[in-house]
Every structure is written in structure tokens, then in C-alpha cells.
Image: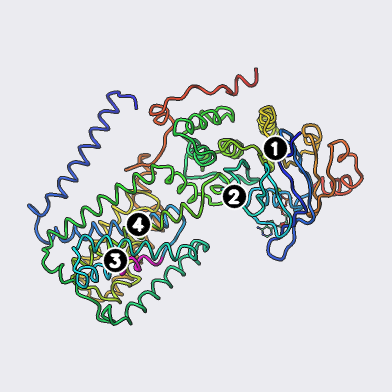
């Protein structure tokens, strides 16, 4: 299988505070890479580095054959990286439809007809179609999470970054979001997926990366990662928080 | 759009209102008194000023405190172009816009790296620096400023038309802009800049376009204003009170709305005329305007237009993209992957 993403020796810091160091891994096309690790391990920071919101001070990120280490977030989006935010960041003054239009209009840049068609398709597949004309600031958390996915999908990403889409939801709502993620997997899109639900992650990912205070602690097949002593130590220690 | 009776009635009503307002504006000098003509002329300029500050602060998160720079540059360019170079006034006005754009683009590479307070203070600093330069160059009349000799030949009614054409064009530009793809991107930047960036909206380019449009039109507006004054003087034309007026207009009217600066501009001109009959102390009037603005922010943070729109659920000059209307305009085939189909 073709490698769509290659992260090599990545170092990221906020000012002097080092968050990620010596992190290396690959993602193959159409696969799902799960990322687990305790709070503060640097999972969201990894998303930020991949989507361009922070620029690493060392290391390289190669996506789809292009070195994107220093590219801006909007360039990366047009290049095929879509993302969601752990704490949803909708365009609150715009309607659900308009939120998705932003992604569709700027992500690939097509004719007006194609943009509207894309928006409608995405709204339907994320169960938001009925709420198209609702102002995003009035949505429930579940719908905000859906909107995060919808807006990212509208940009037609080759790689989708999901940052804790299930966090903060009730069990029933988690179930709904998980169904949506299953659907995404079915479309063949490459996914990097951060989540705290360890069991789900072990079952429904192709590879797992466990982060612990910024270093790729262990990386490989889910069974191998879950069985490792390191993960047990890092993870069980914070599970109950 | 489907043509049912309701739609046709709404459309007709809108066209009729627009035509009546435009007809009244363009015939005013023939039936209105001199004072009214002067007031409406000022409104045209202040609404334009408000629109352009709103474009920066209300839509792209660029809280400029330096709009007076373009007013001054517009006035001075007009003076030099018409008096020194002997060019027609209209050419001088446009040149004022162009020189403003050149300055804005030159500064943008510095300014657009800053956010919030830093951007605000930097724009103010550059405007002050420009004032100091202009006030020391003898070619530009130092502290005395320059006469716009050619403008003396114009009567108020003629300058009135410059102002009305300017505000009508500006309003049309704003509506068209906000309904375009760039407008959609600006709304996104306004609501969340990082999410807009990761959704593909180019930050630098979108903001640069806003700065270009805003500096051009504000520059022309400065030219039109100093045409009516005949004399452009550095401390008045580069005064922060221009931006204070713009902020007042937009905050009172409703930031981030198209109709806001129109309502705010009308109120501002009436108020400042009334205040100037009470006292001749400019700074005292500025304090009173400030108090009124703060009161409005406390009572109705979204301004008059924003509050009215929220209460009654409609928008004047809306840039909203409703699903139904978009589908009526661009019919698309129903998408395959609906929730129901997926689960079956
Ligand atoms: N913008 C920021 N500025 C400074 N420190 C940050 C910032 N964002 C995150 N951090 C810090 O970086 C570390 C990793 O955070 P994060 O990537 O959000 O972890 P995770 O998503 O795994 O919970 C934490 O210690 C956090 O406090
Ligand atoms: Mg996180």
C-alpha cells in the first residue's frame, strides 16, 4: 500500500515548552491510524502540526509526496488534509449549510453548482440536512461534533484528522458519532483518529500510536500496542480520571 | 427562485423601496433646502467611512485605528493632483484611492502579521507617522496644508452628487462582496480564524483584499470630503477622530451588518450637527459621542440593526445563503448517501 503520510523525527514546542519530540510514523492510504495517550500527551498538538496551526521546529511532514512541513493551514486543506476540533469551532454566526459551504467552496474550489451539490451530499451523510438553515451557534454538542466532521468532509480531504469526536457526549450520542466514523471508514478515506475509548480504538483501527508526554511511545498493530507493557503502564495509570 | 405570489410581492416591494430612495437621493438638490443637501452629503461620506471600517473590523477581525491615514492621503493627493498637476478633480479622487492602496499594500506585509490590539495600535502609529511626515514637507504646505483651488468652483449641490455616487457604489460593492465567495470566507474568518484556515480560507489573501478595498474607498472618501472643504490641513485630515467617528457609526448601527453603517451614519451626522450647536469644543463632543456609544453597547451590544434583526428575524440587505434559495437557483440531484440508506 502507498504511504500517504510520513512523519519523520517531529519536534514541536509552544515557545520553550517542548511537547512533541522525536516522533516518527507513517500512514498508509485508506487506513485508520488510532492515536491514544493520556491527557496532555500532545495528541491535539500532533493534529495542529499536521494541519499547520503550529510549525514544528525540527523534523518533516511529507503528505501525498509533498513536503508540507512549513505550509500554511489553508494550503494544507486544499492539498487534502481536513480536520475536526476537540472543542468544536463552528462559524457561529453562519448557518449549518453556510458552514459546510465554506469547506466546499474553499477546499477544492469548484463551480457553484458542484459546491452546493457537495454541501448537500455532506449534510445528508452527517444527518444535518434537516438543520441546514439553523444558525450554528444554536446547535447542541452532538450536532456541533457532526458539523465539525461535515465541514471537514466538504473540503474533500484525502486525510481526515478526527480529534476526540466522541468526547463530552452521552453514551447514546457516542454511539451515533461512532456510526458516522464507521461510515467514513467505509468511504476509503485515510483517517487519523484520536479517541479515549480504548476498546473501540483497539477494535476499529488498522494501526495504533500511543503517545506519552510527546514521544511516540509505541506504534504498530493494535493488538501489539494494546498488549505492550508500556501502554499498560501509561494508560492504566490515568484511565480512571 | 420559485416565482410564487409571495416572492413576487416581496421582490417588487424591495425594488420599489430601492427606486424611491435612489430617486429621492438623486433629485434632492432640486427640491430640498441647502441645509438638508449639506446634511445628506455628509451622511454619504460618513456612511462610506463606516462601511469601510466595518469591512475591516466587522468581517475580517482587523480592528483598524488608522482609517484617518487614507482620509488624509485622499485629501492631499486630490490637492496635489488638481492644483500642482492640473488634473481634473475626478482623476485626483481616483488617484487618492490608488495612493491609499499603494500605502496599504506596502504596510500589509507588516500589519497582517499582527492581530487584535497589536494591529489596532500599529495602524494608529502608521497614521501618526504619516501625519508627522506630511506636516513637515514644505511641498505639502507643512502645518498649513494645501488649497484645492479647483474645488472652489463647485457648488455644494455638485459635491453632493460625488458623495451620493460614492455611497451608492460603496453599498453595492459591500453587498456584492459579502454575497461572493470572498464574503463567505470573511464571515468564516470573523467567526473563527483558525477553523477558517483549516477549512481552506486563505488568511493573508482575504484580509489583503479587504485592506485594498477599504483603503481605496476611504481614500476617495477623503478626497470628496476635502473637496467640500476646499482646504486640506494635516492635523484635521490625519486626526484619529475620523476613526472614532467610524467606530461610533458601526457600533451604534450594528457591527458585522450591511445596514448597520447606514443607520449609524445617519444618526452620527444628526447628532454631531446637534452637538456642534451646543458647544464648539470638539473634544467635548467626542466624549459625548463616546458615552452614547458605550450606552448602546451596554443596552444593545449588536447595535440598532443587529438588535432589530434579531428581534424580528429578518435581515435588511442580507448576505445569508439559505439552503432552499440556493437549491432553487442551482438545482442539484439528491445525494446518494442519506442516513436511511446507510443504515439499511
Ligand atoms: N497553545 C498552547 N500553548 C502552550 N501550551 C500548550 C498549548 N496547547 C497545548 N499546550 C500544552 O501542550 C501539552 C499537550 O497538549 P495537547 O496536545 O492538547 O494534549 P492532548 O491533546 O494529548 O490532551 C499540554 O501540556 C498542554 O498544556
Ligand atoms: Mg487533545
Label 2 to label 1: alpha-carbon separation:
18 Å
Label 4 to label 3: alpha-carbon separation:
14 Å
Q: Which residue is mark 2?
A: A73
Marks 4, 3 in one chain: yes
Which residue occupies 19% across, 63% down? B89
Please provide percent x and percent y for residue B301: 41, 54
Marks 4, 1 in one chain: no
- Find the magenta span and give its range: B65-74
Q: Which residue is mark 1?
A: A191
Assign the magenta stretch its main secondary structure: helix
- Front residue of B254/B192: it is B192
Please provide percent x and percent y for residue B103: 39, 66
Q: Is residue B117 above or below residue B171?
A: below
Q: Earlier in the sequence, mark 4 or mark 3?
A: 4
Which residue occupies 34% across, 24% down? B2
Pointer 2 with pointer 1, Cβ within 8 A: no
Q: Which residue is mark 4?
A: B52
Amino acid at each position: 500500500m502507498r504511504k500517504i503520510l510520513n512523519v519523520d523525527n517531529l519536534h514541536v514546542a509552544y515557545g520553550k515548552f517542548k511537547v512533541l519530540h522525536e516522533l516518527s510514523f507513517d500512514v498508509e492510504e485508506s487506513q485508520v491510524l488510532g492515536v491514544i495517550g493520556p491527557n496532555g500527551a500532545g495528541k491535539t498538538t500532533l493534529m495542529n502540526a499536521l494541519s499547520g496551526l503550529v510549525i514544528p521546529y525540527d523534523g518533516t511532514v511529507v503528505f501525498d509526496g509533498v513536503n508540507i512541513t512549513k505550509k500554511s493551514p489553508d494550503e494544507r486543506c486544499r492539498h487534502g488534509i481536513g480536520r475536526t476540533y476537540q472543542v468544536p469551532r463552528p462559524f457561529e454566526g453562519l448557518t449549518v449549510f453556510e458552514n459546510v459551504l465554506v469547506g466546499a467552496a474553499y477546499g477544492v474550489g469548484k463551480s457553484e453548482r458542484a459546491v452546493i451539490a457537495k454541501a448537500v451530499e455532506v449534510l445528508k451523510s452527517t444527518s444535518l440536512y434537516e438543520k441546514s438553515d439553523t444558525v450554528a451557534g444554536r446547535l447542541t454538542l452532538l450536532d456541533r461534533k457532526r458539523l465539525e466532521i461535515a465541514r471537514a468532509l466538504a473540503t474533500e480531504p484525502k486525510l481526515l484528522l478526527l480529534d476526540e469526536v466522541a468526547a463530552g457526549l452521552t453514551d447514546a450520542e457516542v454511539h451515533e458519532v461512532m456510526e458516522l466514523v464507521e461510515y467514513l471508514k467505509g468511504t476509503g478515506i485515510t483517517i487519523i483518529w484520536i479517541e479515549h475509548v480504548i476498546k473501540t480504538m483497539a477494535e476499529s483501527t488498522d494501526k495504533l500510536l500511543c503517545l506519552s508526554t510527546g514521544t511516540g511511545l509505541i506504534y504498530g498493530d493494535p493488538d501489539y500496542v494494546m498488549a505492550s507493557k508500556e501502554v499498560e503502564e501509561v494508560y492504566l495509570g490515568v484511565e480512571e480520571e | 427562485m420559485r416565482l410564487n405570489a409571495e416572492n413576487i410581492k416581496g421582490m417588487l416591494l424591495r425594488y420599489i423601496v430601492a427606486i424611491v430612495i435612489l430617486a429621492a437621493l438623486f433629485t434632492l438638490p432640486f427640491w430640498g433646502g441647502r441645509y438638508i443637501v449639506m446634511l445628506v452629503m455628509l451622511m454619504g461620506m460618513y456612511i462610506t467611512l463606516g462601511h469601510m471600517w466595518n469591512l475591516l473590523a466587522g468581517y475580517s477581525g482587523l480592528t483598524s485605528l488608522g482609517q484617518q491615514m487614507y482620509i488624509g492621503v485622499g485629501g492631499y493627493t486630490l490637492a496635489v493632483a488638481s492644483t500642482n498637476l492640473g488634473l481634473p478633480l475626478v482623476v485626483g479622487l481616483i488617484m487618492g484611492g490608488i495612493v491609499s492602496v499603494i500605502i496599504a499594500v506596502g504596510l500589509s506585509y507588516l500589519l497582517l502579521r499582527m492581530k487584535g490590539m497589536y494591529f489596532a495600535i500599529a495602524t494608529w502609529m502608521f497614521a501618526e507617522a504619516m501625519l508627522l511626515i506630511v506636516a513637515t514637507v514644505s511641498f505639502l504646505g507643512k502645518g498649513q496644508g494645501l488649497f484645492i483651488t479647483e474645488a472652489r468652483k463647485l457648488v455644494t449641490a455638485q459635491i453632493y452628487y460625488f458623495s451620493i455616487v460614492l455611497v451608492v457604489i460603496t453599498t453595492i460593492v459591500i453587498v456584492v462582496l459579502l454575497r461572493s465567495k470572498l464574503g463567505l470566507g470573511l464571515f468564516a474568518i470573523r467567526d473563527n480564524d483558525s477553523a477558517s484556515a483549516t477549512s481552506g480560507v486563505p488568511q493573508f489573501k482575504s484580509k489583503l483584499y479587504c485592506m485594498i478595498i477599504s483603503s481605496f474607498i476611504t481614500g476617495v472618501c477623503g478626497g470628496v470630503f476635502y473637496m467640500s472643504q476646499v482646504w486640506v490641513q494635516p492635523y484635521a485630515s490625519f486626526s484619529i477622530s475620523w476613526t472614532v467617528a467610524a467606530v461610533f457609526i458601526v457600533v451604534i448601527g450594528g457591527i458585522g451588518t450591511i445596514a448597520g453603517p447606514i443607520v449609524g451614519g445617519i444618526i452620527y451626522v444628526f447628532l454631531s450637527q446637534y452637538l456642534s450647536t451646543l458647544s464648539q469644543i470638539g473634544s467635548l463632543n467626542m466624549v459625548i459621542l463616546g458615552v452614547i456609544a458605550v450606552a448602546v453597547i451596554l443596552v444593545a451590544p449588536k447595535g440598532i440593526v443587529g438588535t432589530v434583526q434579531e428581534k424580528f428575524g429578518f435581515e435588511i440587505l442580507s448576505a445569508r445563503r439559505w439552503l432552499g434559495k440556493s437549491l432553487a437557483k442551482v438545482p442539484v440531484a439528491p445525494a446518494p448517501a442519506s442516513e436511511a440508506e446507510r443504515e439499511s
